[in-house]
Amino acid sequence: MSISDLSPELQDKIKNSITRVSKVIFPTTTNHHSTLFGGTALAWMDEVSFITATRFSRKRLVTVSTEKINFNHPIPSGTIIELVGEVIRVGRTSLTVNVSIFLEDMYAEGREEVIHGQFNFVAVGHDGKPTPLFDK
């Protein structure tokens, strides 16, 4: 279901579940090119998407898939990034979270989106089977 088709209450839940995490890129998280290791970026994105989805639904969730992850620009050591997660689709038992990573130089104004991806989740009951996101 499109976000614009959701009730005002659910649209408010989406706004309230937006998650922002900022980090400094230290040498311990970089590869041999002194840029952020891609696997670390993916782990951080998965964590932010999970937090966002959980804050929105308050249900037990599992990641079922990711959509294309675009690495548009390397992230050098000594920079600041901000990960931003937002729910972009809500189904009966599933939802999709968009995560963007923005890059900032520590000593200059401005920022740019450098990584983008989508993470799909399904709500599960204690039996591990899909369950509705919201009680009727």
Image (tube, rainbow, N blue to C red):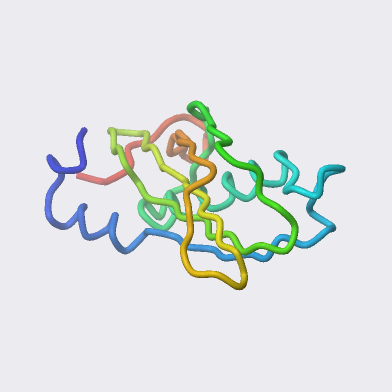
Q: Quadrant of the C terminus?
A: top left
Identity of the residue drawn at 77% across and 62% down: 26
> x%, y% of residue 43?
66, 45
Identity of the residue drawn at 21% across and 52% down: 10
> x%, y% of residue 96?
39, 37
Left or right side of 34 for 10: left
Q: How many marks?
A: 0
Left or right side of 6 for 21: right
Left or right side of 52 for 90: left
Identity of the residue drawn at 20% across and 36% down: 2
Q: Which of the 4 image quarters holds residue 72?
A: top right
- Which of 71/40 is in front? 71
> x%, y% of residue 29?
79, 53
- Which of 109/21 is in front? 109
Q: Is residue 20 above or below residue 91?
A: below
Q: Is residue 125 above or below residue 19?
A: above
Left or right side of 8 for 65: right
